[in-house]
Each structure stands twice: as structure tokens, then as C-alpha cells.
Image: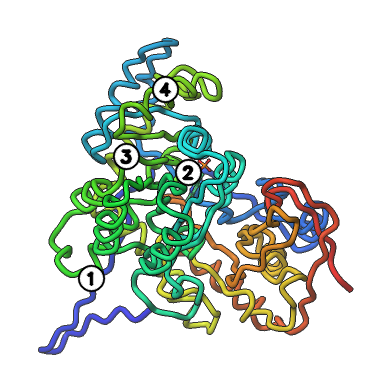
Amino acid sequence: MKNEIKSSKKQIVKRSWAEPYKMKMVELLTMTDRPHRLKAIKQAGYNTFLLRSEDVYIDLLTDSGTSAMSDQQWAGMMLGDESYAGSRNFFKLEKTIQKCYGYKYIIPTHQGRGAENILSKILIKKGDIIPGNMYFTTTRLHQELAGGTFVDVIVDEAHDPVSEFPFKGNVDMAKLQAIVKKYGAKRIPYVCIATNVNMAGGQPMSMDNLRKLRAFTKKLGIKVIHDMTRVAENAYFIQQREKGYDKKSIREIVFEICSYTDGATMSAKKDALVNIGGFLALNDWDAFEEARNLVVVYEGLHTYGGLAGRDMEAMSIGIEESLSDNHMRARVGQVEYLGRLMESYGIPIVKPIGGHGIFVDAKQFLPHIPQDQFPAQTLAAEVYLDSGVRTMERGIVSAGRKSNGENYFPKLELVRFTIPRRVYTQAHMDVIAESVYSVYQRREKIKGLKMVYEPKYLRFFQAKFEKLV
Ligand SMILES: *Cc1c(COP(=O)(O)O)cnc(C)c1O
């Protein structure tokens, strides 16, 4: 990187971002050699989810539950009120969510999918249609298990890895109108929108789009439910890219986003900087009452929902920290740094660079491997083999099968390099990009995979593969 500080009259002074924290404890990493990694990846059936973490050097499998907590959060853990009912930490969490996000009623859950399960059971009837801005694995599965059918209404740009459209998370209002016309508003209990759409490569929705969605659905009595797992990252992009928001804080933007929705599911393991936790938030009392009743069946009493008091305390503090402008600039800045490096090596990545990771386009990287030989799964295994960097597949394996048994063939066939929050340094980013480049240089020699074991649900977690010869 050029860091120009010239002493001539015309000074060009570059102002870099840097981490708004310092380290007071470190975790040592394991370094392995290639023969060790070859054995490990074979044993794992070429599925990076099945590797042991002690065989991994830099772990970019996910940004879920992998963040580093602050000293404040760790101190908060000591303030856990582990009473079965009515824990002090619950009331603090409730207040924090009401203040930061504006939702009225809150139920803690063990993580995001716990909230999705309860929400889907309450709001979805058999035969219902749930439009959404691209599917998410667990979200769609819970909708289907509740008898609903997910329909993708994200803008076409989201499926195009080279489109530089700034708001690839947007709902295509024409697509949504067509769905309403086809099925009728009565069969659509809610539109499910994700902020900073994970499966599109960490791409934001615009505030303008949210406002339009709100206006359109309100007329029809259709709710808007918010998968707010990465809402702060979405707010950062609105601040950077949308007219009228450059002077607003992340905190203000997040609050406004939530105000256009009727409720939310949250995996606090992402933006909210904790290792475990989530919640369901609702503005409607009747729906909340039902959810509060159902949570007892699946998670635990409604004042702990599968969490310890200390977990709720750490979540409250993490939510506040996630809304800091300095935190978010460094967070997304680090992702961008890795993306720019990869671009400088000619690696095909999804553009614009997203909020929580770099998504490498495996179809372009390995054009000689057909999609049913799992190019993204193959590439993830090759990167691990090269350097011990663990990534994951987001392509045909993740997409799974339709209810009629046919494979989904998603347009995007990606390898996700997800960056945990506050965990790795810029030097780690250099090592990662160099490794991908090294695989890129020998890409033509790389062969695909065949699936030899396929679990019924969410197959990407546990499927096994063998190398084609
Ligand atoms: C992770 C995630 C979920 C599910 O949350 P868990 O905490 O993993 O159960 C739901 N939606 C999105 C967009 C996610 O990234």
C-alpha cells in the first residue's frame, strides 16, 4: 500500500483507519504443514465445517459467534444474575433493545434460529408465501417447516457478482407487487428482509427502499419482519453511500431502519459481538404473547430463552459497542483492505466489497469445474490446503434441494472469507490474500469433487466429498 507523506509544499497526507482498541490478552495459533493439512481435509471429507479448529491457522469460516469481546463485556459476564426467572440482566437487555432498536417486546433466544423457529410457527400458516431479499439457510428452512414457501424478491443485481450496484440488498418492488398479485395479500403474512444480506455477499438495503417497502406493505396489511443480524453493517453502508445520511451516526441510522419494520429476529453472534445469543422482537402484543408462550417449549422461560444471565449482560454491552462509528469504520475497513488486496492480485471477488467478508467467485476462479462438481467447495478445500486458512462454501452445496428433491442451482457460487470482528490483524489479511493468489496461479490443475454423503437438512454443514481423479 502506498502511504504517501511528502515533504514538499503540497503535502499529501493519508489518514488510515486503525483498530479502535488495543490487545491485553492473546490466543496462540497453531501453524501446520501441508502433509498435516492434506490428511486433515481428507478426513473432513473436503468440508471445512468438519475440520477440527486446532488444525486451522486463520479461521474465516464464519463471523458468527467468533468475535472478540471487550474488557467491558468480560466484566459484564461477572455480573450475571443466574436466577431462573426475572434476571436483572434480562431487564437490562430489554431496555437496551428498546432504546437502540426501538422494538417494544423482546424474547431472548439461544441464537438467531431459535427466534426464527418461534416466529415462523406463530406467523406462518400452511400454504403461505414469504417473500424475502434472498434466502438464508436457517430462515428459509424454518419457513418451510412451518408450511410456508419462500420467494426471492431481491433485485437482479444481487445475483450478478460483477454488478457494482451500491444497494444489492434491495427488494425489487416490481417483483414483490407481482407476488402479491399472483397469490393475494392474505397468503403473505410478512415480507422477510435481511439487512446487509449475507447470501448476496454482505450487501446493504437502502433506506429509500425500506421506506418504499414499508409504504407498500402497510396498505395491504402485510408485516415487515427484519432479520437484523447485520443491521449495523448495513447502517454503515447507508452512511457512506446514501444521500442525506453522511452526517448521521450509525446509531441513528440503525434506529431508523428498525422503525420501518414490525419485528425482528437477531443472531447476536454477528453484529452484537457475543459468542452466543439472539432474540425475537415484536411490536404487536398478540404475536408477542403467543411467542412468549411458545419460547417455553423450545428455548426456556421468556426471561432467559436458553441463555445464562451473563450471556444477556454481554449482549447488552455488545449491542451498544456495535453502534459506535469508530468500531464500524475499522470493522468494514478491514474487510475492504482484504478485498482490495485480492483485487490487486486479479482474484475475482463479488463487488462492491461487502460488510462481513470477501466472497470469491468460484465460477470465475475455476471455470473448468461444472457447478455439479462443486467449484466453491473445491476452492475452499484448496485454500485450506495451501495455508491453513479456513473459509466456507456459499454455492450449490449451501443452496440444498427443493422440496421436490431437485438441487437448487444458485447463480452465485462463492467462497466466503468471513472476518471475525476484532480478532485478526492487517498482517493476517496479507497472509490470506497471498495464499489465495498462490492457489489462483495453479488453478487450471485443480479438479472438482463428488458428494459421497448428504444429510437431509442444511447439508453444507455435514456433507462429505471425495476428490475427482
Ligand atoms: C447467522 C444468521 C442467522 C441464524 O442465526 P444463528 O445465530 O446462526 O442461529 C439468520 N440470518 C442471518 C442473515 C444470519 O447470518
Q: Which mark is residue 319?
A: 3
Left or right of 15? Residue 402 is: right
The answer for how far apart the CA atoms under marks 1 and 3 are is: 28 Å
Residue at mark 2: 26
Asked whether disc 1 touches disc 3, contact meaning CB atoms under 8 Å apart, the reply is no
Q: Earlier in the sequence, mark 3 or mark 2?
A: 2
Mark 3 or 2, closer to the camera: 3
Where residue 301 sits in the image (x, y, percent)? 46, 17
- Tags 3 and 2 in contact by the CB under 8 Å rule? no
Q: Residue at x 65, y 55 (%)?
A: 31
Q: Position of residue 120 (x, y in %)?
A: 50, 38
Give me the residue at 37% from left, 65% from top: 170
Residue nearest the viewer, comparing 445 with 248: 248
- Label 2 neighbour load within 10 Å: few <14, some 14-19, many 20+: few
Q: Which mark sits nearer the N-terminus, 4 or 1?
A: 1
Nearer the viewer's eye, disc 4 or disc 1?
4
- Check disc 1 and give the amino acid type: Arg
Asked if the residue at label 1 sits under 8 Å from ligand 1, the reply is: no
- Find the distance from the CA under tag 4 to the CA under tag 3: 22 Å
Q: Amino acid at mark 4?
A: Arg
Residue farthest toward the right in the current orientation of the protein: 469
Q: Residues within 10 Å of mark 4 (few under 14, many from 20)?
A: many
